[in-house]
Amino acid sequence: MAFGPGHRLFAQYVHAPNALGYCGPAEAHALAATACGRRSADLTDIARKFTGAWPYQQLIAELSDAPDPLGADVVRAYWTGSELTDRIDRQRFGEALLGRFASQAGHYWKHLTPALLDEAAPTHAFHVLGVYPWSRLLKTGMPQPLEVLDSCRITDGVVVDVNDERALVRSRRLRFEGTLALAAEEDRPLRYRLAEGAFVADLRRGDRVAVHWDFICDRLTREQANCLQHWTNWQLDRTNRRLAREQ
């Protein structure tokens, strides 16, 4: 059974929404164990059942001649962005991705058309803001669309305090006032530990971290945090162009 850094990284990022029942198979315990560095299941088999993330990682691997969709470079490119993300031809990627999603699309996904290619990028930010329908519900005034978008995207932040139960993370949430933007920094208490352990060992003040569904899932280098910010801002800009056209 293969197990490498990409397997662990994938488990770190998918565990929180999976544990909440939002995506993937019922494998929260196996994912948590893997994210803590203990191989407990066939991660490739589990990953294939994530119908959102897996097609992206497959295509990133194919378009970059990478041998494994669960290679660490491929996983990193999708979840936070990287130099590999920059090298992927967005037009080719978008056309291939929409082709793969077409078989899954029902009346709920009518927006998955070539008109979406302007927003297409091989990142989780595109899946959240472009493919998911929630950005199209922002103008209803209901709080849920913004809450889901903010929770589902990968947020970068800095740890300002930490104890045995929670860490206080300074980050920027999404706001919507006609356009989507990042709000001012605020400090939020977030979980970072499960019964299986912590995904980020020896968490300390000053650490740059990635947050998914209010859970600290990864420690980031400055370069990785900057890349995540770049692709977040890029996607927000493209999403706002579409929202302006739809007025």
Image: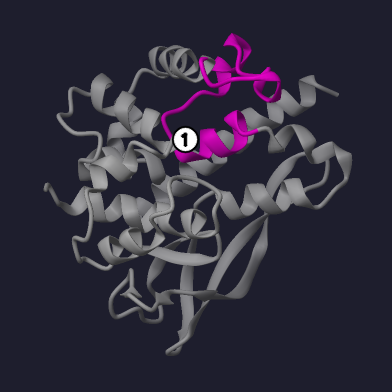
Q: Position of residue 146 (x, y in %)?
A: 73, 49
Quarter of the image that includes the C terminus: top right
Q: Secondary structure at mark 1?
A: loop
Please tell me whether residue 45 is drawn above or below residue 155 in the rendered image: above
The colour style of the image is one colour
Would you call the spot at circle 1 few (<14 residues within 10 Å), some (14-19), or many (20 or more)? some
Q: How many marks?
A: 1
Query: Residue shown at 47%/70% (left/top)?
Result: 158
Q: Going by the image, does 124 lie left or right of 148? A: left
Instruction: Give the residues drawn in magenta, as a range.
Output: 103-132
Q: Amino acid at mark 1?
A: Gly
Residue with the mark numbered 1: 52
- Magenta stretch containing residue 109, yes or no? yes
Q: Residue furthest left?
A: 1
The answer to whether residue 199 is visible is yes
Residue 118, quarter of the rendered image:
top right
Query: Residue shown at 53%/43% (left/top)?
Result: 232
Q: Residue furthest front?
A: 26
Q: Going by the image, does 210 lie left or right of 31? A: right
Query: Residue shown at 55%/65% (left/top)?
Result: 214
Q: Nearer the viewer, residue 212 or 118?
A: 212
- Magenta stretch containing residue 220, yes or no? no
Q: Going by the image, does 122 lie left or right of 30? A: right
Q: Position of residue 124 (x, y in %)?
A: 47, 39
The answer to whether residue 221 is visible is no
Q: Nearer the viewer, residue 84 or 110?
A: 110
Query: Residue shown at 11%/48% (left/top)?
Result: 1
Q: Position of residue 58 (x, y in %)?
A: 30, 28
Q: Going by the image, does 239 lie left or right of 60? A: right
Q: Nearer the viewer, residue 89 or 102?
A: 102
Q: Position of residue 67 (x, y in %)?
A: 14, 29
